[in-house]
Image: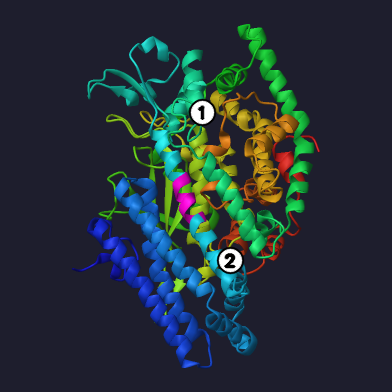
Amino acid sequence: MTNPLLNPFILPPFSKIQYKHIMPAIIQILKNRQIIVEKILSQQINYNWDNMMYPIEEINDCLNKVFSLISHLNTVIDNPELREIYKQICALILQSDTWMLQNKKLYEAYLFLKEKNYALLDDIQKKYITKVLKNFKLSGIDLDKYEQEKYCKIVNRLSEIEIIYSNNLLDASMGWEKLVVKKKELSGISKNILTKIREKSNNKEGWVLTLNFPIYLSVLTCCNNSKLRKEIYLAYSTRASDQGPNAHQWDNSDIINEQLLLRYKLAKLLGFKSFADKSLVDKAAKKPKKVINFLYILLDKIYKKAKEEIAELKFFIKKKYGVHKLNPWDFAYYSQKQKKYLYKFKDEELRSYFPETIVLSGLFELINRLYGVTVIKRTNADVYHPDIVLFDILNKQKDLLGSFYIDIYARKNKCSGAWMNTCVNRMRKINGNIQKPVAYIICNFNHPDQNKPALLTHNEVIILFHEFGHCLHHILTTIDVPGVSGINGVPLDIIEFPSQFMENWCWEPEIISLISGHYKTGKPIPSNILNNLLKTKNYQKAIFILRQLEFSLFDINIHYNFHPQKNKNVLEILKNIRNRISILPYVKEDRFPNSFNHIFSGCYAAGYYSYLWASVLAADAYARFKEDGIFNKETGKSFLENILMRGSSEDFDNMFKRFRGHEPSIQSLLKQYEISL
């Protein structure tokens, strides 16, 4: 049997892959990796980049390409068979990684490179060797055999339950639906959504509501039926918990408690005071107290403004609708009403002006102006679903820089949210050739109708720009060592910087004219609506930041202050934070931690603050474009050369200072959000 996953490839051979190929491929690659490492160590040679690093990096790249492919498919075409395969290969890879990072002979070989042949390495190679040696330390290389066994048990179990958490959340999200047979109960919801949820088969006739995010958000913001808004709000806010319509069915409560305990034990085993201390070793902020101080400084700056915003909303609904109490399921609905009252349009009304094709065309024109690169759609690409499109990015000489897949429509068995995943890393191969990077961009927007293209809200346009910022960071790199090229090795509190930076252009009139046009006539957004859209930029922005502060303080607190004998009730910790800072209404059934995928199944544990940290960088960097001109080619070139091209090949502080001329300042963020200093 020819296994397509064992043949060298750059672009995944989707059409050739069968599930039976996955496990044999992973087993063979891991076996080959162990053979290569043992062969290198058995020769006891004068280790250098060519005889040690190239062979290891080549086999690691092979493993990365296969695992990235399977990991991606597991999030976009979830099914029981693939879940089980993914769970098994995660365990195998973790076992192999631990074997390598607790291999003292291999560690000594890396030390030899640093201590004896360091002068032969270039700066990028030195940076990577330093990073690998730190990974050895964080993987327990200094522990005795008994402690290493404890380490292995902990990390294996953590890997296992993170997958369980994610699966529970996906199942809980897909496990709720409601058939509405009377259309009047859905008044206020756009025709676009009603058409998509209309059901006339499987003994159903009516409109089927699900927790698919575009549907959930449409009900919460537009539906005039308060009872229905409450029902879907409670279903969504109690997912994977002991509350709500599917209470205990996919409950993540015990998983959360076990995770926190294991993370605490892991940190202690490695000599850290807390898991937050361990996590922040690889982040720009470095220390939990620095993070907490940053969060409270920002809280102090925006809290008054946030209280004013919520007071204005309550005054509005009392005066306009005679409503004296703002329920949690009413917040988005009445905010949309207030927004329309203030700015004379609804978000849904702008969909007609943001067809996906024009948005993408304008986005590609923007990066051409900024960075001199061109995006070309590739025809006849091998893809895993008919909706997927592959694009290439070319430089001015028409040389290929990299490629990316776009998968932006919501569908069943696809994880909710939006993200960018790496597919292939840039790398100089042992034969001297440069392997070009490849990325995935995933969103969950409404699918096109039969007679019209996919139509986006302005907020969805912002989401797309955000993920494309990650994509550019991965693809425009010129670093040839995969461990520090693109987004690899970039501190988590820096990695959101290029993506949040990209969002700024969505508010520039010149760019809006590029990315918009009525899907039928091509006419631009009417000037009065455009002017009002621009005024919405900072609508309830302080409330938004306050919500992010709530998430960030919860995350850093449970990972910094957790102790198995005290401070271990996450709901109490969340309640205390909300009592101190929150101005939004909540219900006692709310189980937000049970669906906080970022920190309990993603990589953001003790790192959710990164979004706010990076927003300071993004605002300050964009301020230079506002000063120089948003299409200034020299400024674009500087951002490209100092930020996007460099990956994690040097300290970020130096990169940022070269671009901006000074250290990042919170003042730019506050100014951008029109919050008084």
Residue type at numbered disc 1: Gln
Quarter containing the C terminus: top right
Residue type at numbered disc 2: Arg
Quarter residue 56 falls in: bottom left
How far from the left and from the top, in percent, is residue 569?
Answer: 65, 39
Vertical arrangement, residue 240 with respect to residue 152, above or below: above
Q: Nearer the viewer, residue 677 or 323?
A: 323
Vertical arrangement, residue 129 with respect to residue 152, above or below: below
Task: Tell me which label, 2 or 1, sits earlier in the chain.
Answer: 1
Magenta residues? 158-165
Residue beneath the point at 41% across and 81% down: 36
Q: How many numbered badges does the structure rendering display?
A: 2
**Mark sitting on residue 428:** none
**Mark sitting on residue 646:** 2
**Mark sitting on residue 243:** 1
Label 1 element class = loop
